[in-house]
Image (tube, helix red, strand yellow):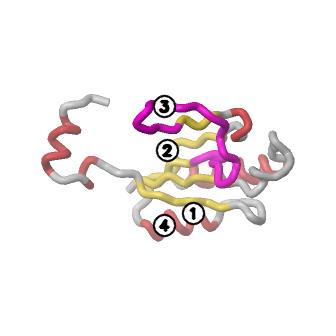
């Protein structure tokens, strides 16, 4: 089963509008990433620029509106993991060298098998 693990940095929403990790933090995170890769469970990972460099698109009956991205609770990066169980995903998440105040959100990725047959049939019509 596949999971996505979102990093929600505590530093977002502070006075520092473009916080960047220290070399020490990057070294710790890369060592963790290497452990995930060596265990054969890492499918992909990426860090994201801070919310100050992004936008939020909101939708209503009047259409789409573009505004500033909200720093509170913003995602700073993610990993996609292929693991044998929910418990394994949680154990790997707990090993992340996150900073005090950071949060990891762990969510299972929907697979075609998770949907009812009629939805699977619709999904089967697309090759993406």
C-alpha separation, residue under disc 4 versus residue under disc 2: 15 Å
**Mark nearer the N terminus (4 vs 2):** 2
**Mark nearer the N terminus (3 vs 2):** 2
Q: Marks 3 and 4: which is nearer the front?
A: 3
* Res 40 visible: no
Say above or below: 36 vs 20: below
C-alpha separation, residue under disc 1 versus residue under disc 3: 38 Å
For the residues labelled 3 and 2, say whether their Cβ atoms are less than 8 Å apart: no
Seen in the image, is 119 located left or right of residue 47? left
Q: Residue 61's image quarter?
A: top left
Q: Residues within 10 Å of mark 1 (few under 14, many from 20)?
A: some
Q: Which residue is mark 1?
A: 92
C-alpha separation, residue under disc 4 versus residue under disc 1: 6 Å
Q: Residues within 10 Å of mark 4 (few under 14, many from 20)?
A: few
Q: Which residue is mark 4?
A: 88
C-alpha separation, residue under disc 3 versus residue under disc 4: 39 Å
The magenta segment: 58-78
């Amino acid at each position: 089963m596949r999971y996505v693990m979102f990093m929600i940095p505590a530093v977002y929403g502070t006075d520092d509008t473009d916080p960047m990790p220290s070399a020490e933090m990057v070294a710790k995170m890369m060592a963790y990433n290497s452990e995930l890769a060596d265990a054969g469970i890492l499918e992909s990972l990426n860090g994201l620029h801070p919310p100050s460099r992004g936008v939020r698109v909101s939708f209503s009956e009047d259409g789409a509106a573009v505004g500033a991205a909200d720093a509170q609770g913003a995602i700073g990066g993610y990993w996609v993991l292929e693991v044998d169980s929910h418990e394994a995903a949680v154990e790997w998440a707990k090993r992340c060298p996150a900073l005090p105040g950071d949060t990891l959100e762990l969510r299972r990725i929907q697979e075609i098998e998770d949907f009812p047959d009629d939805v699977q049939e619709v999904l089967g019509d697309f090759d993406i």
